[in-house]
Image: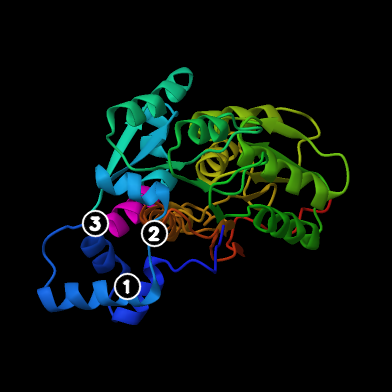
Amino acid sequence: MTRPDRPTIRDVARVAGVSKGTVSFVLNGRPGVAEATRLRILDAASELGWTPSHRARALSVSRSFAVGLVLARPPEVLGADPFFPAFIAGVERTLSDRGQVLVLQVVPEDEEEAGYRRLHADGRVDGVFLLDLRVADPRIALLRDLGMPAVTIARPDVPSDFPALLVDDRPGIAAAVRHLIGLGHRDIAHVAGPAHFLHGRVRRQAWAETLGTQGRVVEADFSAAGGAAATRALLDTADRPTAIVYANDLMAIAGLSVAQELGIAVPAQLSITGFDNTDLAAYVNPPLTTVRTDPFVWGRSAAGALLDLIEDGITDDVPVPDTHLVVRASTTSPQRS
């Protein structure tokens, strides 16, 4: 989503020698900028021939200086999963730096669309984050019809004009499976996230493609209780797997507890890997082999992209650091019978 022939506030900031935030304050007529700086910015904008896009001009008439996040997850899941607090903390850090606020709504899944419509109708936010992408996500078309600026966390699998945070879970899951195969495991099961979530499906596909053979999979809901139930289903068999790849750390840590409760030694009798490298992963016994991500950085990057989109009317997709496997003591070679 680039238009190199049209100067943006980035260009104005570069020529004026100030931050994009300062340029935004001046071009939106907000107080708090020294007169000499204000004049330098206006001169730079004039020199470059900068004019706001139609979207940016409309937004500048009535700005809330707030952005929105609607989460259709049970509150108890949000409280237990460290991903969401870390992501929101990153968002808040960037918003605070640029004089903005976050409006958070936690709603039942069947009220999510109404949540976006309320935010738009009330004029409470200037744009939104789209988290927990669905397969064939209908929210893309909804936000496009509403004319609401948005940033998607990962690239959706349907056509989208919105910039995306270029999150790719596949290399991390593939690395976990290859690690287990390298240790000698062949019966590697997967505790997956919900298939209607795009990241749940992507992680499952990466596991299956890397494994290359038929494997056992149990779908859960990313919660500790779901991970525990799925683990029991896999281990309560005569031919239990020698390794399990979990779609997040919360389910993996719950699965580790279940294995120990059943008298199955980890990693001697069962190797376990997680995903997210949450703080707790390094302190369970044994410490968890997992895939490192950085939701705090994701939050900061997503917030910066959304504010740029709101101010400029256009912005690029945003790369994020690659995931990589952190090997700890929860994985080893399978026992030889």
Front tag of 3 and 2: 3
Measuring from the top left, give residue 162's x and y in whole percent.
Answer: 54, 47
Q: Residues within 10 Å of mark 1 (few under 14, many from 20)?
A: few
User: Where is residue 148, by image quadrant?
Assistant: top left
Which residue type carries mark 3? Asn
Which residue type carries mark 1? Ser
Residue at x 54%, y 39% (from the top left corner): 251
Quadrant holding the N terminus: bottom right
What is the C-alpha distance between the residues marked 1 and 2? Answer: 25 Å
Q: Which residues are magenta?
A: 86-97
Q: Is residue 226 above or below residue 337?
A: above
Q: Is residue 94 left or right of residue 325?
A: left
Q: Which residue is mark 3?
A: 28
Which residue type carries mark 2? Gly
Mark closer to the chain start, 3 or 2: 3
Q: Is residue 242 visible?
A: no
Q: Which residue is mark 2?
A: 304
Identify the element where label 3 is drawn. Answer: loop
Q: Is residue 130 visible?
A: yes
Front tag of 1 and 2: 1
Mark closer to the chain start, 1 or 2: 1
